[in-house]
Image: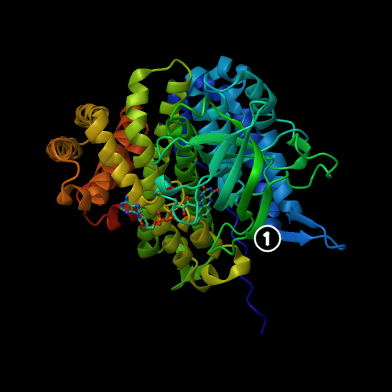
Amino acid sequence: MSRFVQPVPAPDDPYAGDRLLRSWLERQLGPAGHAAAKGRLADLAADVAGPLRAAQADAEAHPPTLVRYDAWGARVDRIETSAGWRQQRAAAARHAVVALPYLPAARGTWGAATRVVQHALLHLYGPESATFSCPVAMADGAAALLSRPEVDAEVRDAWLPRLISTDPATAITSGQWMTEAQGGSDLARSTTIGRPAADGSWRLTGEKWFCSAADATMAVALARPEGAGRGSRVLAPFLVPRYAADSPLAGAVAPDAPAPGVTVHRLKDKLGTRALPTAEIGLHDAYALPLGDPAVPGLVRAMTLVVVTRLHNAAAAAGGMRRSLAYARAYAEARHVAGGPLSTNPLHRATLGALAVDAAGAFALAGHAFALLGRVEVGADPEAAAELRIVAPLAKLATGRLAVGSASEYLESFGGAGYVEDTGVPRLLRDAQVLPIWEGTTNVLAVDVLRAVAREDAGVPLLRRLDGAADLARPLSPVLADTLAALAGELRADLAAVAADPGAVAVVAGARGLALRMAYALTAALLVEQAAWGDEQAEVAAVLWARRWLRHEEIAADAHHHLDLLG
Ligand SMILES: Cc1cc2nc3c(=O)[nH]c(=O)nc-3n(C[C@H](O)[C@H](O)[C@H](O)COP(=O)(O)OP(=O)(O)OC[C@H]3O[C@@H](n4cnc5c(N)ncnc54)[C@H](O)[C@@H]3O)c2cc1C
C-alpha cells in the first residue's frame, strides 16, 4: 500500500487573487492611479510567492543569535541574522515598502493616496516577511518623526535619506527604544536620562527592556532630559546610532561594533516573531541626537512615530488574516473529508466564510487609517487629522484582537497539520499574539480612546461617518441602515457619558467594550462606503459584518453561501 502524502497547499497570487484589495485601490486611487500602481504590486506579489516565501522559511529556521565575545575575549555584542532575514531587508528596500510615501515621484503620482499604495504594499509584503514588517514599521515611524519641522535639518539630511533609500546597499532601518523593565505602557516610569554635551549632541544613560530590530542601524530612544521633571510628557525622542560607524565617539573601533555606550545584554526568547532580534539594551553615555528641542515636552513628537507604527500593526493584522485565509482555502481544496474536498463541506465553508468577513473588515479598517494618514501628511487636512486621532487606536486594537482569534481558527482549519512546526502554520498564531501587545495593549488603547473622546471630542468624526453610512446603506439593505442608525444613537449617548466623567469607574471599566463597539461600527461604515461605490463583495461583507459584530447573529448559512465571493 502506498503512503499518502498530502499535496502542499498553493495559495492564489496575493495581489491578483485579492478582489477586495483590487477594488479598494480602484476606488481610492481611481482607475489611472490604480493602473500606475499595478506593476509595483504585481512585482512584489511575485517576489512574495517566490523567493521571499523561501527567505521567510530560512529566517524562521535560523533565528538570530547574540555573540557577546570574540575568540580573544573582547566584548563584541554582535547580532547574527540569517540570509533569509537579510533577503527580507533587501526586498523591503527594493520594493519601497518604507520609502514610497516619502518619494516625490510617488507623491506626484498619487498625492495624499500614496499611503494607500503603501498600505497595499504592506498587505502583500508583511504576512510572509518573517516579521521584517516590524523593522519596516519602525523605520517608517522614524522617517515620519525625522520629517517633522522641529527636527534639526542637519540631522534630518544625514539620516532620512538612508531610511527611505530604495537601494538595499544603502537602506537602513530603525529600532524604537521606549519600554523599560518597570514600565512599557506607563512611560512616566521611564528612568533613562539625557544629558547635553558641549557640541549640541546628547548622552543617554539607562536600560531599555524591549528593543526589537536590535540589528537596525539606528534607534529612536525616549529619554528624560536632565532636570525636566517627572511624568511622561517631558520625555524626549533622541536618535541613537547603533554602530560605531555612525558614532563620533567611536575612535578606532571596528565600524560594525556597537557604538560606544551601547551594550546588548541579551536577546529575548519570545513566543513568536522568532526571526526578529529583540534585545535588552543598556545605554551608558551613549551618543544621541535630539529630535526636536529636548526642552520642549517631547512625547507629542514621539507620538508621530507611534501613530505610524500602530497603523503598521493594523496592516500586519489585516494582511496576516487575508494570507491565512488564502492558505486555508488552498488547503481545503487539496484536502478530502467525508467523501469529498473539504472546500465543498458546508460547515467548513461557513467557518472560512466568517473568517473572510473578519479579514475584509480588518482590511477596510487598516486601509482607512492609512488613507487618513496620507491626507494629514499631504495637504495637512484638519478633518483627516481629527479622525485619525480616534481611528489609529481603534484600528490597532480591533485588528489586533481579530487577528489572534482568527489565527487560532486558521490553525484549526488545517487539523493536526496546523499544530506541526514545519508546515509553517503554527507561526500564524504565535506572530498574531504580539499584535495586541506591543505599541499599546488593547486596554491601554481603550484608555487612549477615552482620553481622545474626553479631551479632543474625537467621537465627532466617527459619529459623522456612521450617520453618512446609515444613509448610504439604505438602498442596499434597510436592516443594515437601521442597525447603523441605532448604533450611532447609542454611541452618541455613551460618548456623552465619557465626556461628562471620563474617570468614572464604570466608564473606565467599560472602556474596552466601548472601543470595540466603536471600531466594529466604524468598520461596518467603511464596508458600506465601499459597497455604495459598487463593490459587491464589500456589500456582502458589510451585511454579514454588521450581523456578526453589531447584532451578534449567527451568519453560518450566508457565510457558507458567499465564501467564494468573500475569499
Ligand atoms: C515581541 C515584542 C516586541 C517588542 N518590541 C518593542 C520595541 O521594539 N520597543 C519598545 O519600546 N517596546 C517593545 N515591546 C514592548 C511593548 O511595547 C510593551 O511590552 C507593551 O507596551 C506593554 O508594556 P509592559 O510590557 O510594560 O506591560 P504593562 O504596561 O505592565 O502591562 C501589563 C498589563 O497592564 C495593563 N495596563 C497597563 N496600563 C493600563 C491602564 N492604564 N489601564 C488598564 N490596563 C493597563 C496592560 O493592558 C497589560 O495587560 C515589545 C514587546 C513584544 C512582546
Q: Is residue 565 left or right of residue 521?
A: right
In the displayed structure, 347 sits above or below 380; it is below
Q: Position of residue 170 (x, y in %)?
A: 76, 33
Q: Residue at x 35, y 58 (%)?
A: 350
Q: Amino acid at mark 1?
A: Pro
Could you say which is closer to the camera, residue 416 or residue 276? 276
Q: Position of residue 288 (x, y in %)?
A: 63, 35
Q: Is residue 185 visible?
A: yes
Q: Is residue 178 left or right of residue 376?
A: right
In the displayed structure, 165 sits above or below 509; it is above
Q: Is residue 365 left or right of residue 148?
A: left
Provide the residue designation for mark 1.
63
**Snapshot quadrant of residue 376:** top left
Q: Secondary structure at mark 1?
A: loop
Q: Is residue 562 visible?
A: no
Q: Which residue is most to the right?
A: 72
Q: Residue at x 45, y 26 (%)?
A: 296
**Snapshot quadrant of residue 106:** top right
